[in-house]
Each structure stands twice: as C-alpha cells, then as structure tokens.
Image (cartoon, rainbow, N blue to C red):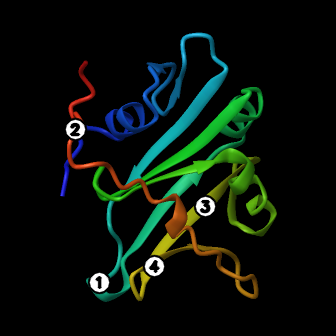
Amino acid sequence: MIQYSHPIAAVTATAMISLVKRSRSLYSTPDGNTRAWISVSKQHGREEREKYWFAFHPHQQASLREAEQAFVVLGCASADILFVIPYVEIEKYLDKAWTTERAGKMYWHFHIERRDGKYFLLLRRGEENPDISAFLLVPDEGENTTGEA
C-alpha cells in the first residue's frame, strides 16, 4: 500500500492540483476557488469496530461554502485511509450529525466506523448511517506520495 507523508500530499497527487495552506486545517487553490478542510483522527475502539472522530466548526463550514468547489478530507489514523468527500455531500447530513455546545459555541461531530469492510458516517440515533466507502481515496501504485513535484 502506498503511504503518503500527509493527507494534503494524497489530495494534490490524486487531483493534480496545487493547494496552499490557509490555516491549520484549511487549504485552497491559489485563487481560492477550490478549498479543502483536512482533519486526521486517531483510531478509537478495537480493530473489529474501528472508529474515528472529527470535529467540524461553523467557521470551517463558512469557508467551504464560499468556494466554487469544496471538499472535506478525513484521514483515519494516517494518510493511508483517506476520504475526500465533496462538501455538498457532507452538508446533507449536518442536521443529523452529533453536536456539542460549549460556552455558547457549537460544533459538529463526524464519526466514521468500519464494519464488514465498509465505512459508515455515524449519525444520531434513529438516523440511517450512510456508506461513505465510495469516497475512499485509493491511489495508483505509481503515484508520487511525497507531495513534491
């Protein structure tokens, strides 16, 4: 399996675009038209029920909404298990996602769980958990994985 040095290296190599770091977790093309929010989670739970957890804040949502093209990039334990999900897909589930409010501020939780060889976005109880396996980034064996040209 190919190992990337960082999730952004995987995205830029696969999409063949140049992304510039704008903040700790936000990247964009130089013109800002394409944006990616990137987060990596350690593995929670046991191997038979791998789980990953991500926090997504309203200011990150606002930045993605302003772009012509936007992606949520979720790395699970490393850059080896990486999801590149169009923001429009994620937005469909925000009202069904878990949330936390602290000191008058709210953020969403994205939980991913691996079951039976598939990956699911875990939503609040009673909601159907969508299979997001189609968004798993699987690189070609010959790709440059360092992010360098």
Numbered tag placed on residue 46 in the rendering: 1
Numbered tag placed on residue 5 in the rendering: 2
Q: Earlier in the sequence, mark 3 or mark 2?
A: 2
Q: Position of residue 131 (x, y in %)?
A: 58, 75
Q: What residue is drawn where x is 32% and y is 60%? A: 42
**Amino acid under disc 4:** Lys
Query: Please, what secondary structure does the residue beneath circle 4 have?
Result: strand
Asked if residue 65 lies left or right of residue 144, the reply is right
Numbered tag placed on residue 109 in the rendering: 3
Q: Earlier in the sequence, mark 2 or mark 1?
A: 2
Q: Position of residue 36 (x, y in %)?
A: 55, 34
**Amino acid under disc 2:** Ser
- Measured in 3D between alpha carbons, the distance from the residue under mark 1 to the one under mark 3, in whole angstroms, is 20 Å
- Measured in 3D between alpha carbons, the distance from the residue under mark 2 to the one under mark 4, in whole angstroms, is 24 Å
User: Number of callouts in the render?
Assistant: 4
Asked if residue 11 lies left or right of residue 84, the reply is left
Q: What residue is drawn where x is 62% and y is 26%? A: 34
Numbered tag placed on residue 118 in the rendering: 4
Q: Earlier in the sequence, mark 3 or mark 4?
A: 3
